[in-house]
Image (cartoon, rainbow, N blue to C red):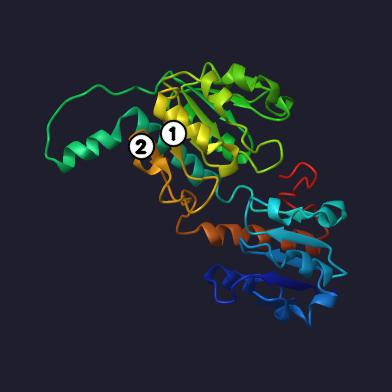
Amino acid sequence: MAAHTVLVLGNPTARHLRLLDQLPPETNIAVGESLEAFANLAPTADVIFHTTTDAALWPALLGMTPHLQWAHSLWVGIDKLLTPEFKASPIPLTNARGAYSKSLAEFCILGILFQAKNVRRLLRQEAAAHWEKFDSTEIYGQTIGIVGYGDIGQEVGKRAHGMGLKVHAVRRNPANSAHDPILEKNYGPDQLHEMLAVCDYVVLALPQTPGTVSLMGAAEFKAMKRSAVVLNVGRGTAINEAALVEALQSGTIAGASLDVFENEPLPKESPLWAMENCFISPHTADNTHTWLDDSTKIFIDNFARYTAGEPLRNIVDKQAGY
C-alpha cells in the first residue's frame, strides 16, 4: 500500500494534534504554520488537514499541492476556505460537523432558561442579599423556531422537545425533515416570517453563505412576538447587530442570547454589553474540555475511510457553502 502524505496547517505543539499518532506509521506528516514547513512534502501531498482559524495561507498551500485528493477542516465553518478556484475543483472538502453540536445545543437551552427564569435578576438579588419574589416564565408548551435545521439545529430540537417545547424549523430543503418526529411544523426559507410570528424562541444555527448574511434584520425582528427571544450559535453575520440593538432597546423583542457576533471580539463599545436583556457568551459555547480532540477524531476516522476507499464523512457542498 502506498504511503499517504498529510500536510497539517496548524500549531505543531497543539495538544489535540498528538492524536495524529494514530495514523498509520507509514504516513508522511508535516505540521506547521508557514509555507516553509511544507516545502519538502507539498509536491507529493494528497491530504490537507486545516486546523487554524486563519485561512491566509490556504490559497498558496493549494498551489503547492498538485496531487491533492482531499482536504479536511477542523472546524464546521468553512467559508474562508471556499476560494473560487477550490470551489471549482473536484477535490472534496470535509469538516467537523457533529463535533460541537451537542454543546451548542446545551448553550441554547441555557440561553432560553436564562431569559425565561430572569437569571440576571436572581443573580443581582443574590449579590445584594435581597429577598424578593417575582414571576418567571414556564417554557413547557412554548414554541421554539430553529433557523438552519442541520446537525446543530436538530440537536437543539431534541433537547427543546424533551423539555416540552413545540419545535418548528426553517431549512433550505424542508423535504429533508418531512418525517422528523419532533417537528410540529416545517418551513421553507420563503416562510421565515410566518414561522417567526408564532415562536417564543428563535434559534439561528446557520452557516455563513451569501444568503444568510444579515438574514435577521429589522423586518424579521418586527415579525417576531414582542415577548420573543433570539438566540445565535451559528455565525454572527446572520444577525444585523444594529437592527438587533434597536429591537432590544425598543422592546420589539424581549431578549437575545448570543454566542457569536458580527465582529469578534465584541467591541467594548457595543451597546449589547450593557443590556439587561442580552446574554453574551464570548464564542465559547462549544469550547468543552474535549472539543478539539473530538474534532480531530473525525479527521482520523475520515482518514481511515479515505485510505480504504470508503465514502468520506461530512462532505461539504462547496457550492452551497456547508
Mark 1: secondary structure: strand
Name the residue tied to disc 1: 256
- Residue 320 can be seen, yes or no: yes
Residue at (55, 21) in percent of width and height: 196
Which part of the image, by quadrant, shows the C terminus?
top right
- Say if 87 sits above or below 57 in the image: above
Q: Are marks 2 and 1 in contact (CB under 8 Å)?
A: yes
Name the residue tied to disc 2: 275
Mark 2: secondary structure: loop
- Where does residue 261 sit, x and y in percent of width and height? 52, 45
- Where does residue 75 sit, x and y in percent of width and height? 62, 55
Foreground tag (2 vs 1): 2
- Where does residue 266 sit, x and y in percent of width and height? 46, 50
**Residue 40 sits in quarter:** bottom right
Instruction: Identify the mark nearer the N-term, 2 or 1.
Output: 1
Residue at (55, 67) in percent of width and height: 16
- Say if 70 sits above or below 262 in the image: below
Which label number is shown at residue 4? Answer: none
Residue at (12, 35) in percent of width and height: 130
**Residue 304 sits in quarter:** bottom right
